[in-house]
Image (tube, coloured by chain):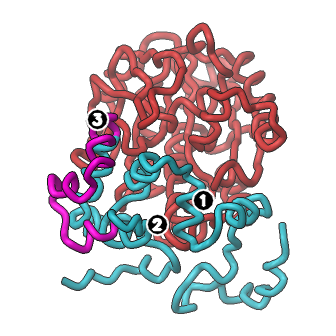
Chain colours: A red, B cyan
Amino acid sequence: MARIIAGATSSHVPAIGAAIDNHKTEEPYWKRVFSGFEKSKEWFAKTKPDVVIGVYNDHASAFSVEIVPTFALGCAAEFPPADEGWGPRPVPVVKGYPDLAAHIAQSVILDEFDLTICNKMEVDHGLTVPMNLMMGTSNGGWPCPVIPLAVNVVLFPPPTTHRCFMLGRAIRKAVESYPEDLRVVIFGTGGMSHQISGPRAGLINSKFDKAFLDDLVRNPKRLTKIKHVDLMREAGAEGIELVMWLVMRGALDDKVNEVYRFYTVPASNTAVGHIILENKPKKSKSSRKKK
Amino acid sequence: MMREPQAYDDIPGTFVFDQERSRRGYGINMFCMSLMKAENRKAFKDNEAGYLTKFPLTPEQTDAILKRDYNRMLELGGNIYFTAKLGATDGHSFQHLAAVMTGSTQEDYAKMMLAGGRPIEGNRSKSGKNEPKAKSRAKAKGRKKR
């Protein structure tokens, strides 16, 4: 049986990708950001998941305003990096896991989450920057397959925090009914507080961010009650990306172990927040049967 | 036509890209999307006004694009991830655009970010109705650097 063993969240600031691609990670400004992910890379290398589910958003790369799916699941065998206007990022093609993705689609749609299925999709910095931060710079290819789940957070309204949390629950159920023995890690990306549009651009609300991280660990139900208007007011118009973190959290146990946390301001226009949560190890077979 | 009022219109300095703006701003965003291709960037640069006639734009929208009035573009239905492509076509970094939208120089904007960003205190609500009640006394204190 497949199971979700852990989740991680991370910002996906495009400038972080540019710093990697242009070899600027050792500059003091960027070193402050990247040093916060050294432990995360070690954790990922040690954990060696078989598959990652990457919850992210597209930024006018694969989807323009012509078609705007709320939840789009990548079911293809591979996802090439998108040309975001200055050529595709020089990162390897992302390999998918079509069998598990198809199984997830089959399961969560019957659980009333009406996904859009993408059998052809390019992926932008929203997915590949967190992959770099968690997996490293990947000269020889990424260490494991990644199933992308694109969430609309560009056109208002995005799905609610509650909806995202419940989708996480449904994904977990789907994974646990997949027969292959797979250890799955789920990423929630984007955030934390930032606004990049209009006269209020540059907004950062560290107090809100830190409380959000605390609630994400211990009291995610509280986060499922936040209204979009309050999320935008407190975390910035584009900080609404934080809804995606709730998909990750919904896919984990109610009680989790916090393995690692990192927070810094700024990366470009954004507060960087990052956390790794693990499900507690399962007890013996007999106690699991009781459920 | 007047815009239908929304609760989030009370957030200062913010143009939420919602369904109404998206519908009205379709031409702006499709124009910006066209700039993903090098040949289109060249055609636009060669004759800006002429190139814009290929898209369904109101005179106000065309004017905002030609003047690079980024806030006006957002107000008229442009979205930042799209209008940023126009900025890139002009050879500007994103931080340059952010500075322009906030009415500051790029240097000052960058300094503000390094100092912890724009504070939330005083930036929550136009009407003042949505400032936190008990904590609003701490306003002066909250202004200090993090």
Tag 2: residue type? His
| Image position of A74 (left or right of A237) | left
Give the CA separation, mark 2 to mark 1: 14 Å
Q: Dot 3: within a 10 Å radius of its alpha carbon, few (fewer than 14), some, or many (20 or more) residues?
A: few
**Residue at position x 72%, y 55% in the image:** A214
Looking at the rendering, the stretch of residues picked out in magenta corresponds to B36-64
**Residue at position x 66%, y 32% in the image:** A279
Helix, strand or loop status at disc 1? loop
Establish if A267 lies above or below A76: below
Marking on residue B39: 3
Residue carrying label 1:
A194
Marking on residue A228: 2
Tag 1: residue type? His
Tag 3: residue type? Glu
**Residue at position x 43%, y 66% in the image:** B70
Q: Chain of mark 2?
A: A
Q: Chain of mark 3?
A: B
Image position, residue B29 (x, y; %)? 29, 54
The residue closer to the viewer here, B19 or A5, is B19
Q: Dot 2: within a 10 Å radius of its alpha carbon, few (fewer than 14), some, or many (20 or more) residues?
A: some
Q: Quadrant of residue A22?
A: top right
In this view, the mark in front (1 or 3):
3
Q: Quadrant of residue B75?
A: bottom left
Residue that lies at the very extreme toward the front in this rendered image: B46
Pointers 3 and 2 in contact (C-beta within 8 Å): no
Give the CA separation, mark 1 to mark 3: 33 Å
Image position, residue A97 (x, y; %)? 42, 16
Helix, strand or loop status at disc 3? helix
Q: Earlier in the sequence, mark 2 or mark 1?
A: 1
Q: Are marks 3 and 2 on the same chain?
A: no
Q: Quadrant of residue A122?
A: top left
Image position, residue B78 (x, y; %)? 34, 62
